[in-house]
Image (cartoon, rainbow, N blue to C red):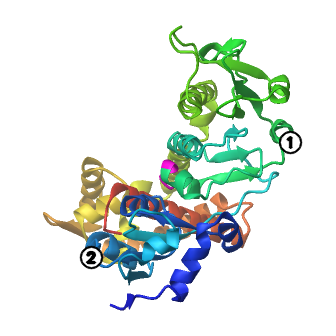
Amino acid sequence: MEIIDSIKDERIAAARTLATRSGRIAAGRCLIEGLSLIRQTVAAGADLDYVLYATGADDPALREELIGAGVPVYIVREGLLRKVTGGAKPVDWLAVAVLPAETEADAPYGDFTVVCEQVADPGNLGTIVRTARALGVRDIALTDEAADLSSRRVLDAARGAVLGCRVRRFADPESAVQSLRESGFQIVVTSPRGTHLQSMAPLRGHKLALVVGSETDGVGAATLAAADLVVQIPMAGAVESLNVGVAAGISIYELRMRVILTMLTDRIRDTLGRNVTLAAHLVRQAFDAHLQQIGDLDSAQAVLLMVLACERSTPLDQLRRDIGVDTAELQSSLAGLRDRNYVTTSQDDAAITAEGEQAIAAMWAVQERIEEELYAGFTPTEREQLQNLLHRIQDNAVRLTGSTES
């Protein structure tokens, strides 16, 4: 493999421009420094342009993972990467990552936003972002032009979580509060002089914006006056205040959990798992009702026959996964089909018979009619989009189970 040994190399030159904030803004890129941080950003799904590592610092597992993901990897002469970052410490691994563009103020929000008002310390800023992402919060609002989420210290403290955030920047705290209120957020400010204990504050139970202030002055008077609630974290007398990163973490956790509990009923009704399960159950009921009018098969047996008609002979384990049933349900359905001579089974697989194929052909008109009725009101484009979305959900579910089989 070629070894990059010149500071004038175009990849080195491009990376060097990212050592300054202006360079990062112009390029829409940032530097990810260090083996562990690169590994974390890859796991989080960050988009990397390319990765550089010093001679003698190879990590074969990470290198192969990056190459497999289509990320170019290059070897660099020892000591050259330190000239890219401008730091005093040796650098063994360096990645150039795509920096997500800041989100427009009027773009859709989630249900929880963290507003950082004049939080200046990069370590605190990174800690707040990392904690927010860990607790399921993606929306971060900044209230000044100076805060730089792309700096090395912020990225390091956030462990790369910045790359998965929706960041909005406002000219001042008043603009941020006004925009969030217009978007339906309840504005909650943390302060040692809060009029409500955080655990007992009267939340409305929907969108909430938590404002945390600077390390020295806290939240400004104008924001305090504009807030819907000013809350405090109760502390023992020996401690007067907490580090803003620590306080923000406590508040994000407690307030977000309280919002979720308040909205739990609505959230349960809207969860993907419930909606998909309910839709599948209702679709099966619709098929069962129509199939009973023309024969003695149920929808589970009909689907099983359809799968076997495609594959002719299918291993039982694969068949169980394909139709989404457990072993007992599969054996029950197969027993009914076997009694009708629609399938034959062995210890490991099942196959459709000629009689089974005839049964599928006979019921196909019913299948098409039910499908047309279920798609009532859908345009052809919407039908195709729904199919594509369902396939994507299935692919993601397979990935989450760790299965390597389709």
What is the CA distance from the residue labelled 2 to the residue labelled 1? 51 Å
| Residue 97 sits in quarter | bottom right
Magenta-drawn segment: 157-161
The residue that disc 2 covers is 56
Q: Position of residue 44 (x, y in %)?
A: 47, 58
Given the current orientation, which residue lies at the most extreme left position? 347
Q: Name the residue under label 1.
A: 175
**Is 29 above or below relative to 202?**
below
Instruction: State whether the magenta stretch is mostly helix, strand or loop.
Output: helix
Residue 17 or 310: which is nearer the viewer?
17
Question: Residue at 52% across / 68% down in the picture?
Answer: 86
Q: Where is residue 222 in the image (x, y as percent from the top left)?
A: 85, 28
**Image vertical order of residue 68 relative to residue 34, above or below:** below
Residue located at (68% from left, 34% from top): 214
User: Which amino acid is tagged 1?
Assistant: Ser
The vertical placement of 321 against 124, above or below, is below
Mark 1 lies on a secondary structure that is: helix
